[in-house]
């Protein structure tokens, strides 16, 4: 069980406080942390956005958000009253320097009322276009540098740029104002309990780590499948696509945890060093070979979970001739001693058959087949790590069927978080916000890791600038385009049935 501790006193300043992210994720997570007494009494939240609003109006809006998007727990009125007293609001234009002077004055007043000791978290829950602007304004207002004995941190939401050039430009803008140790690039996938458990699974169990290499592993599959479409975010998705939106960040972060070497310690620096080193060894994709290693797709009309759904080009805000991919599949190789020759197959898509995220590690076949009389061919051992839903781990191995004949069948050994521990794991934003308060950046993306992800996909993005001629090329409710199956089948392998 996790040893709970209480965070330092601090004020969390949310830019974009009336937006969807704040209402759906941030405020419910912060309320839950107070409900669990994981934040101290010396704690407050200051929201800011363009709209003019009083503190009381903001509190009413946030109470509705917690009731709608919070956990199944009934909203506790006594806890809410304590929480509401710590909620404040300032309206203003992010481009206006006067707003930041008002923020400075308000933070000083809150600090005096709640004894925050000068500790501050700035959360950029805004459109990406404002990230650099807000950081500069914070610097100009002398809010970026902490007072003596205090700390100041800034949390940046994804996307961290649109390509390699813009990611580097954003990192440079942040670096002009904040030290790297102050910058927390949040990727909510890393806050999921199963993703965090990858470290424990690999490095707390001696039975798996000796097998975690090219001698025993045939290949790795990482699947991120969504049954949902763009859900009203067509205008945003037109500029993103599956490769930028999911693979370059979420999927690469998970991939690095599978591929990394054991860290010297569990410090943020050690863990993130090993993740970055693993991704540095990913084999470069020359532009002319992109077709062999990367597949794109776009969904057309179809039936998902019994409902008829429109194609991507019929979604609101989408160009009727769009070439934006809603599905991407990659084959990567790590050119290092551990993984040389072992392909990693990654796929992510929308409007697929079901909602599931998992890692499947398929081991090599036995070197010599003893059971030649068995009425079915032996199947390889597979280790399956389910990130969502039904978080857990399954190990598939061969066992003898009862009876006189020597017949081998695959069986599963299952571990599920819910049934094993009897506890509901914390939401990703709860864990990540608390880690930031503790100053633990282990589960946050570092500058070099972000830029390396863009370096890997750069030739793919370049090749995909040319409009796709066959879109849409998969029906909603299927598992993606036929070319994605060819990507893995020409190597004599198959995607795992989910």
Image (spheres, helix red, strand yellow):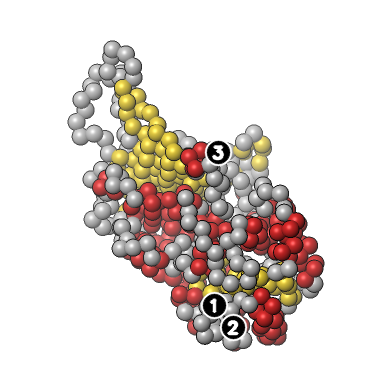
Q: Is residue 413 left or right of residue 313?
A: left
The residue tagged 3 is 353
Give the image quarter of residue 373.
Answer: top left
Q: Is residue 153 left or right of residue 43?
A: left
Q: CA distance from mark 2 to mark 1?
A: 8 Å
Q: Nearer the viewer, mark 2 or mark 3?
A: 2
Query: Measured along the vertical axis of the image, is residue 268 above or below residue 472?
Result: below
Image coords of residue 473 (percent x, y): 53, 44
The image's mark for residue 406 is none
Q: Secondary structure at mark 2?
A: loop
Q: Give the residue at the far top of this rendering.
A: 404
Sequence order check, earlier mark of 2 and 1? 2
The image's mark for residue 152 is 1
Residue toward you, 57 or 246: 57
Q: Nearer the viewer, mark 1 or mark 3?
A: 1
Image coords of residue 451 (percent x, y): 43, 68
Sequence order check, earlier mark of 1 and 3? 1
The residue tagged 2 is 143
CB atoms at circles 2 and 3 under 8 Å apart? no
Name the residue located 37 percent from the left edge and 40 percent from the top edge. Answer: 383
Q: CA distance from mark 2 to mark 3?
A: 48 Å
Numbered circles on residues, count: 3
């Amino acid at each position: 069980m996790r040893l709970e501790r209480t965070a330092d006193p601090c004020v969390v300043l949310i830019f974009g406080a009336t937006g969807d992210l704040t209402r759906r994720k941030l405020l419910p997570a912060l309320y839950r942390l107070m409900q669990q007494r994981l934040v101290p009494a010396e704690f407050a939240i200051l929201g800011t956005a363009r709209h003019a609003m009083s503190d009381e109006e903001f509190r009413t809006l946030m109470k509705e958000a917690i009731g709608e998007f919070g956990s199944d727990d009934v909203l506790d009125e006594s806890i809410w009253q304590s929480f509401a007293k710590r909620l404040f609001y300032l309206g203003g234009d992010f481009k206006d320097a006067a707003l930041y002077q008002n923020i400075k004055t308000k933070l000083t007043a809150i600090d005096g009322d709640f004894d925050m000791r000068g500790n501050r978290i700035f959360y950029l829950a805004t459109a990406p276009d404002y990230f650099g602007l807000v950081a500069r304004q914070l610097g100009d207002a002398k809010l970026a540098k902490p007072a003596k004995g205090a700390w100041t941190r800034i949390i940046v939401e994804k996307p961290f740029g649109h390509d390699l050039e813009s990611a580097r430009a954003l990192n440079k803008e942040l670096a002009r104002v904040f030290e790297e140790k102050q910058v927390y690039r949040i990727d909510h996938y890393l806050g999921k309990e199963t993703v965090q458990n990858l470290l424990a699974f690999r490095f707390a169990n001696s039975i798996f780590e000796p097998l975690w290499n090219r001698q025993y592993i045939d290949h790795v599959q990482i699947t991120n499948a969504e049954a949902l479409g763009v859900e009203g975010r067509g205008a945003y998705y037109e500029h993103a696509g599956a490769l930028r939106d999911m693979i370059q960040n979420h999927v690469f972060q998970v991939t690095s945890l599978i591929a990394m070497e054991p860290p010297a310690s569990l410090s943020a620096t050690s863990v993130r060093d090993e993740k970055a080193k693993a991704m540095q060894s990913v084999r470069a994709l020359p532009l002319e070979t992109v077709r062999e290693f990367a597949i794109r797709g776009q969904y057309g009309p179809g039936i998902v979970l019994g409902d008829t759904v429109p194609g991507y080009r019929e979604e609101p805000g989408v160009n009727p001739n769009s070439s934006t991919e809603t599905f991407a599949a990659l084959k990567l190789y790590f050119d290092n001693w551990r993984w040389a020759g072992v392909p990693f197959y990654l796929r992510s898509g929308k409007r697929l058959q079901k909602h599931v995220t998992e890692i499947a590690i398929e081991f090599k076949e036995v070197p010599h087949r003893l059971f030649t009389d068995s009425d079915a061919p032996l199947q390889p051992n597979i280790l399956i790590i389910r990130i969502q839903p039904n978080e857990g781990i399954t190990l598939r191995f061969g066992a003898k069927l009862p009876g006189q004949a020597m017949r081998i069948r695959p069986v599963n050994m299952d571990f599920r978080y819910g049934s094993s521990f009897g506890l509901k794991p914390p939401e990703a934003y709860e864990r990540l916000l608390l880690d930031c308060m503790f100053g633990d950046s282990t589960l946050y993306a570092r500058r070099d890791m972000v830029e390396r992800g863009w370096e890997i996909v750069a030739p793919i993005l370049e090749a995909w600038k040319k409009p796709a001629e066959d879109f849409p090329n998969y029906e909603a409710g299927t598992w993606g385009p036929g070319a994605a199956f060819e990507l893995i089948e020409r190597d004599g392998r198959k995607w795992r049935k989910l």
